[in-house]
Image (cartoon, rainbow, N blue to C red):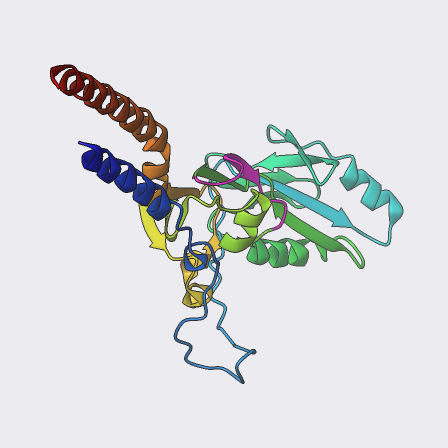
Amino acid sequence: MNKFIHIILFSFLLLIGLNSCNTKNKLIYLENKAIDYKVDDTVFYYKSNPVEYKINKNDILMIRFASTNEEVTKYFENFSGVNNANHYSAMNQNLVGINVNDSGFIDIPIIGKFYVEGYTLSELQKALQLEADKYLINSRIIVKLLNYKITFLGEIAQQGILQVQDNQINLVEAIAQMGGISDYGNRKSILIMRTTAFGYQTYRVDITDRAILEKKEFYLLPNDIIIVEPRPYKVVSSNLREYTTLLTSVASIITSITLIFTLNNNNRN
């Protein structure tokens, strides 16, 4: 009977030991796997393949005009929007947003109504610059998307919504801004849910593989949902307390039974 107890205790300790094996390879980012092109053992090159977001109906844009004419610049800075303006706080500044209406138009001073649906942000900036140059001297236009947000769920330090301040962000940057992936997160299988005209499209990416740097999924788009799934290690860990309680109870019962048998045998002798 004592031998049986020893076997149970040994199995329990072995379970703890296996559960504690948190290897380095499961926690790193961008592991150095097969590389097609490298200069030496420390310098590697990857082709960047960013995906540019195209403006949709109901997007909210920040359009900022600057000119050598201070009065013109001030006029645009005070512009509150003709088409249902919305206010956002970004980079500690109160920015005014202009809605893209259901027909794909915005309405701004001097230029008037302008069709923007389907433009990338860089294309829209160039198009508006051409229009502004007809009326303003030495003007400069800045275009930003104010409703650029990414949702994070799962094994991430901070679940929730990331409001992106720039016009582009990649997966590593976004993860870093949310505090990084937890030790329980599965870095080899991160789910990206992306909204398209036909519904949701999903991708699974391996953040430990440097080849992701050349994939379009590396660059996130507005309204992407990122789900970091748990590793099997967490499932075992989360149940470890239950295992401990159960095994302790079993060991106590077996110890009690062993003691009873021992006392009975001693009384008979």
Res. 88 in view: yes
Q: Residue at x 56, y 58 (%)?
A: 123
Q: Residue at x 22, y 39 (%)?
A: 7
Q: Position of residue 181 (x, y in %)?
A: 49, 46
Q: Residue at x 33, y 48 (%)?
A: 18
Query: 210 above or below 75?
Result: below
Res. 231 in view: no
Query: 269 above or below 140?
Result: above
Image quarter hosting the C terminus: top left
Q: Which residues are magenta?
A: 155-166
Main SS, magenta region, reads loop
| Furthest-front residue in this view | 269
Inspect the magenta stretch and tell me whether residue 73 lies in it.
no
Q: Position of residue 149 (x, y in %)?
A: 53, 40
| Furthest-right residue in this view | 70
Q: Quadrant of residue 206?
A: bottom left
Inspect the magenta stretch and tell me whether residue 159 lies in it.
yes
| Furthest-bottom residue in this view | 39
